[in-house]
Amino acid sequence: MTQVGKVYLVGAGPGDPDLMTVKAARLLRRGDVIVYDRLVQEKVLALAKASSEKIFMGKVLGCHCSRQDEIHQLLVAKAREGKTVIRLKGGDPFLFGRGGEEIEYLAEHGIPFEVVPGVSSCLSAPLSANIAVTHREASSAVAIVTGHNAIGNHERLDWQALSRIDTVVFLMGVHNVDTIAQKLIAAGRSADTPAAMIQTAFWDGSQVVSGTLQNIAAEVRRAAVEPPATLVVGEVVRLRDKLKRLMASNYVKFENKDSENQNQEKEEVQV
């Protein structure tokens, strides 16, 4: 009888393989089967061993039909073949990644599992745009919200409460940005509140669109922003230009100096 394998729910982070955890990269190299989502870059998959079976199970962009039952059954089937299965998810498995549902199903079917956290876009996307989601002068609280709930299931969201939180980060909210802005304004948030939409942070083709709650939807449409993208609302967005200048200055002052020192060390070794 074949010994049952194990399923690892692994967070792949925001996209760049350098931003994965050490454990995530190590497990990826060990996996016999890699079951991955749409938000996993080819550079991340390249870390897997050549003999691994790679199975794409991402949702097609624009299609809201769920493949979750199919994913559940696949994970169990591959584990029962004695395989080490890596369920690779963009960001973190437990933040809008349906990781909780997957481990419930695995547990019900007697499959061993482990969850490995990842860097979520709710923090890394703003950082890529030089936005600190908390700042002593501007924000001491952050709310993380799924933008999908802006329409249909919006009764689950307390817009009055959200409007009072310093920084609100909406994931998967490109198509609902207009509704999100309107609901925050209607709940009491100033229409002049700064807002920024970050598209595909740490991927090729990334871009940042900024404005206010009053005009962010129009700016997003003008720039033809596409998912995945992260919306940040709050005064922290106003500090973006200052932090960007500091980051650029730091690079010129220190990063270039480090490169010069490394080149000098190489020349000395060659001599």
Image (cartoon, rainbow, N blue to C red):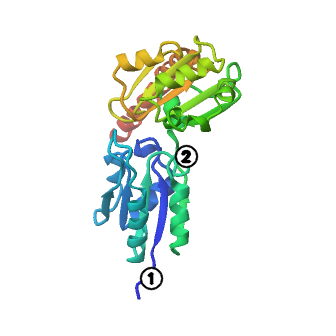
Q: Amino acid at mark 1?
A: Gln
> On the rendered image, what quadrant is the C terminus found in?
top left
Question: In this orientation, which residue lies closer to the viewer: 10 or 167?
Answer: 167
Residue at the disc numbered 1:
3
> On the rendered image, what quadrant is the N terminus found in?
bottom left
Counting the numbered discs, the total is 2
Q: Which numbered circle lies on residue 95?
A: 2
SS at mark 2 in the image:
loop
Q: Amino acid at mark 2?
A: Leu
| Residue 90 placement (x, y as % from top left) | 44, 47
| Residue 119 placement (x, y as % from top left) | 52, 44
Q: Residue furthest top?
A: 192
Which tag is nearer the camera, tag 2 or tag 1?
Answer: 2
Question: In this orientation, which residue lies closer to the viewer: 150 or 141?
Answer: 150
| Residue 166 placement (x, y as % from top left) | 67, 24
SS at mark 1 in the image:
loop
Q: Residue furthest left?
A: 50
Q: Contact, CB < 8 Å: mark 2 with mark 1? A: no
> Looking at the picture, does residue 165 appear above or below residue 25?
above
Q: Residue at x 60, y 28 (%)?
A: 168
| Residue 184 placement (x, y as % from top left) | 60, 22
Reading the chain from its start, which is encountered first: label 2 or label 1? 1
Q: Is residue 130 visible?
A: no
Tell whether 164 sits left or right of 5: right
Label 2 and label 1: CA atoms lie apart by: 31 Å
Q: Residue at x 37, y 25 (%)?
A: 225
Question: In this orientation, which residue lies closer to the viewer: 251 or 91?
Answer: 91
Neighbor class of circle 1 (other Cα within 10 Å; few <14, some 14-19, many 20+) is few
